[in-house]
Amino acid sequence: MIFVPIDNICEGMVLAKDVKIYYHEPNNVDLLKEGYKLTHYNIERLKKLGSVGLYVYDEGEADRRPVRILDDAIKVEAISELEKLFSSLDRNPRILEDSALYGINDVSNKIVDSILSNKKYMVNILDLKMYDDYTYHHSLSVSVLSAAIGLSLELDDKALFDLSLCALLHDIGKTKLARSLINKPTKLTDEEFEIIKSHPLRGGKCIVKNELINERIYNGIISHHEKYDGTGYPFMVKGKEIPLFGRIIAVADVYDALTSSRPYRKPASPSEAIEYIMGANGIMFDPDIVSAFLRKIAPYPINDYVKLSNGKIGIVIRLFPENPLRPELKIIGERNVYYNLYEDHNLYNIVITQSL
Ligand SMILES: [Fe+2]
């Protein structure tokens, strides 16, 4: 169901909610029921009565089920295992017990299985967001996004598994820091920022002895805040000298953080976050990783409704990995009108302004 402005409503559209049309006398009311096919007469009447728009079904809506990359059961299991892992670190603050990682290990396998069995689909970040607790939910999203980027880079299954585990654990060093500092709603002082900057190495230190951790997982954790131009932390390494997992997690981490609601700001839309990533290409992020990310992450997933700068509303029917910000749309309320924002140069000045 979608709300369509009255000027875009056309004959034959099917109502998704009941509508009352009042005539001159108070008792003279027509009730158009849900499922009713609108006629030209009804539409004109509604316009005269000042209706601003109607809820209607889109054609073929029943067949349009959004693709869910990650099953809800896996999300619940992941959050529960992350909770267990973090509380195990509270009990034994210096080193992570081997047993605490088995559950997380299992979750990584399931994430990679889901990514592999949905190979042809792009990932919709909003589909991953369902929990309030930022730390656990962020770790899970970064893991799925990282595995999706890894798949786009054609990493083998073992590497994808290691990458997914590394991303689940990337911020584990934050458990060593005060929660008030992690969630501070105002700007950090220089001293506080120095403490925050210690979390990659603290994280590496507490997992390094674990039997499930290999060198590339360790390297990914300690390098996820390095920047491609060498201005990151803790070691200020640059370019391809930054370990591959660190370069991948850096992109996934920033994308998920920007699209999440934080105490000090509202979430950016997926498209705004993608524009930010594209803007920092080659500065914060490795261009090869950004390309792999763009091939796999959908700011406007298939079946998403979007508003255009010319006021029209469209449904996303096709994506172009070369430019995910300009998909092909079917325009709602106009019969057989399609906008291919990527290939049709006549539409060059039309942009998507909002995801509905
Ligand atoms: Fe981090």
Image (cartoon, rainbow, N blue to C red):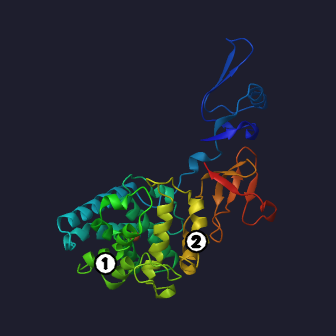
Where disc 1 sits, the SS reads helix
Tell me which amino acid carries mark 2: Arg
User: Which quadrant contains ligand 1?
Assistant: bottom left
Query: What residue is at 47 percent from the left and 73 percent from the top?
Result: 250
| Percent position of residue 132, x then y | 39, 51
In screen coordinates, is 268 left or right of 317? left
Which residue in the structure is indicated by mark 1?
204
Where disc 2 sits, the SS reads helix
Q: Are marks 1 and 2 in contact (CB under 8 Å)?
A: no
Tell me which amino acid carries mark 1: Gly
| Percent position of residue 280, x then y | 58, 73
In screen coordinates, is 142 left or right of 323? left
In screen coordinates, is 336 left or right of 241? right
Figure check: 186 above or below 177: above
Query: What residue is at 50 percent from the left and 72 percent from the top?
Result: 251
| Percent position of residue 154, x then y | 50, 80
**Is residue 152 in view from this perspective?**
yes
- Mark 2 Cα-neighbour bin, 10 Å: few <14, some 14–19, many ≥20: many
| Percent position of residue 60, x then y | 63, 47
Which of pointers 1 and 2 lies earlier in the amino acid sequence? Answer: 1
Figure check: 24 above or below 326: above
Query: What residue is at 45 percent from the left and 58 percent from the top?
Result: 128
Q: Nearer the viewer, residue 55 or 275?
A: 275
Residue 342's label in the rendered image is none
Q: Does the residue labelled 1 lie within 8 Å of ligand 1?
A: no
Which residue in the structure is indicated by mark 2?
295
- Which quadrant, please, contains the N terminus? top right
Q: Which of 255 and 201 is in front in this view?
A: 201
**Is residue 113 in view from this perspective?**
no
Q: Which of 241 and 352 is in front in this view?
A: 241
Query: What residue is at 77 percent from the left and 63 percent from the top?
Result: 348
